[in-house]
Structure formats: structure tokens, C-alpha cells
Image (cartoon, rainbow, N blue to C red):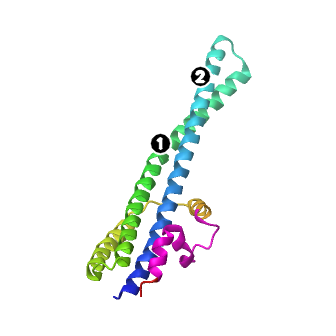
Amino acid sequence: MNKSSLKYELMDALVSVGWTHKIQEKQSELYLKKAQNFQLIQLVSSGIASSTLLANIQGSIGWVMWLTAISSLISFAFSGILKAYNYDELSKANKRYANQQFIIREKIIRLLYSLINETNLDEIMLEWSDLNKERIELSEHAPMTTPKACDLASYELKSRGDNKRHEDYALFLSEHILENLNNVK
């Protein structure tokens, strides 16, 4: 592999890892928000059920009994949803994976600097081979993401055009690296 081929392979991997990192971050945030919302609903409905139950003990009022029953049912349902889906753990898994992708991204950037600074090409290729193997092995265990997470990531990085990687280099590389990479032949 020549220097130019390695440059493009590293830049392509950088964009792929950058997008993966951002999508995983957004998915983590979505799960965390869902957990917080469901916990709030559960807390409020439990509070209503408890307070209306006390009011109901003092005197049998029809609408209070119904409010108690509905609040208890809502609290029970959201408790089950939180237990069944465990959004807190799902959020943490996406966050861990995003952090792993961030580390790989930083290592790729370091390799690009090495390429610019004329470091031994064989050493860079060997390091890239090991890093790429790690990247592929990690991808086998990637947590699930949703289209909404992809849309949020796309919105935050740019306004669509996900496959235009040559435009994405500027999102993940500094101008200095890009200028120097343009001189690599």
C-alpha cells in the first residue's frame, strides 16, 4: 500500500468512526431522556395514587376511587416498562460504545499526523492494521440504534448528505491536517 492509498483509507475510516460515535451518543441521550420521562410519570402517578388513596379512606368518593385506580395502573405499567427495557442500562451501553469509537477516532487522527510528518510508512501501516482489526471487532458488538438517533446525529453534524464523505472530512479533521494531507502524494 502506498502513502496516498493509506491516507484515503484512514480518512474514510475516520468519517465512519466519527458518524458511529455521534449516532451512539444521540441514541444514549434518547434512552436517557426516555428513562427520565418514564420515571417522572411513574413518580407522579404513584404520588397521585397514594394521596387519593388517603382521601378515599376518609370517605368513599366515586371519582377519587377511579383516580386512585387509574394512577395505580399507570404507575404499575411504567414500572414494568422501566424494568423490562431498562433504558438506563441501554443508555450506558450506547455511551460506552460511543466512547470506544471516540478513542479509535483519536488514534486515527494521530496516524494521519504521523503520515503528514513522514513517519515510517511501514510502522503506520502496521499500527493501522491493528487499529482497524480492533475497530472491526468492536463493530460486532455495537449496541442497537434507531433512525431517530441517526437523524439527530445528521442534524447536529450537518443537514443530511450522509454519504458525501469527502465533505465530512472537515467535520472531523482540523484545517491544518486537511491542508497537509492534500500535500501527501
| Disc on the earlier residue, 1 or 2 | 2
Q: Is the residue marked by circle 2 packed among few (<14), some (14-19), or many (20+) residues within 10 Å?
A: some
Residue at 68% across, 23% down: 65
- What amino acid type should be assigned to the residue bearing mark 2? Ser
Q: Could you tell me what secondary structure mostly forms the magenta stretch?
A: helix
Q: Nearer the viewer, residue 147 or 75?
A: 147
Percent across and percent down for residue 34 are 56, 46
| Residue 141 numbered tag | none
Magenta stretch: includes residue 102: no
Q: Is residue 45 above or below residue 107?
A: above
Q: Is residue 68 left or right of residue 138?
A: right
Residue stretch in magenta: 157-182
Q: Is residue 48 left or right of residue 182?
A: right
Query: Helix or strand or loop: what does disc 1 sit on?
Result: helix
Which of the 4 image quadrants contains residue 100? bottom left
- What amino acid type should be assigned to the residue bearing mark 1? Lys
Which of the 4 image quadrants contains residue 8? bottom left
Q: Nearer the viewer, residue 163 or 78?
A: 163
* Distance Cα–Cα, label 1 vs label 2: 21 Å
Q: Nearer the viewer, residue 58 or 31?
A: 31
Q: Nearer the viewer, residue 13 or 136?
A: 13
Q: Is residue 34 above or below residue 27?
A: above
Residue at 39% across, 67% down: 139
Percent across and percent down for residue 47 are 59, 26
- Quarter of the figure that contains the C terminus: bottom left
Residue at 59% across, 22% down: 50
- Quarter of the figure that contains the N terminus: bottom left
Residue at 47% across, 66% down: 18
Query: Helix or strand or loop: what does disc 2 sit on?
Result: helix
**Residue ID for mark 1:** 83
Percent across and percent down for residue 168 are 54, 73
